[in-house]
Amino acid sequence: MKKNMGTADKIIRISIAFIIAILYYMDIISGTLAIILLLIAGIFILTSAVGVCPIYSLFGISTRKNKNIKGSQEF
C-alpha cells in the first residue's frame, strides 16, 4: 500500500490516542464508551505506525508531502 499520511497527521493521531489512554487509566471514561475509544486509539496508533489510512485510500486523500525530485514524475 502507498503511504498517505503526513507527519502532522501522525502526531495528531498519536496525541489523541495518548489522551484517550490517560482518560481511561484515570477512570474518567469507562464501560462501552471506553472500549470503543480504546479501539479507536489502537487503530490510530496502528495507522500512524504504518503510515497508511484505509479511509484516506478509499477517498484518494493524502496528507503526505510529495518528495519527488524536481523534474521527475511518479508513475
Image: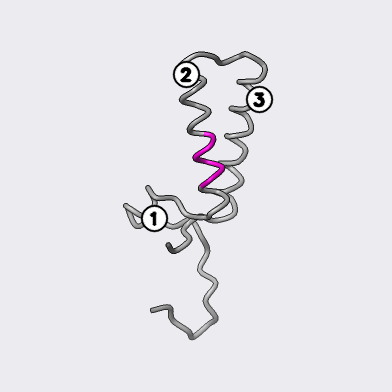
Q: Taking 14 as reference, is 29 above or below it?
A: above
**Amino acid at dot 2:** Leu
Q: Residues in magenta?
A: 41-46
Q: Is residue 48 left or right of residue 52?
A: right
Judging from the image, what secondary structure is the residue with disc 2 in? helix
Sooner in the amino-acid sequence: mark 2 or mark 1: 2
Question: Is there CB contact under 8 Å for labels 3 and 1?
Answer: no
Front residue (pair 17, 62): 17
Question: Is there CB contact under 8 Å for labels 3 and 2?
Answer: no
Judging from the image, what secondary structure is the residue with disc 1 in? loop
**Amino acid at dot 1:** Ile
The tag on residue 61 is: 1
The tag on residue 32 is: none
Question: Is there CB contact under 8 Å for labels 2 and 1?
Answer: no
Sooner in the amino-acid sequence: mark 3 or mark 2: 3
Question: Closer to us: mark 2 or mark 1?
Answer: 2
The image position of residue 27, as x and y in percent, is 63, 13
Q: CA distance from mark 3 to mark 2?
A: 14 Å
Residue drawn 53% across the image and 45% down it: 46
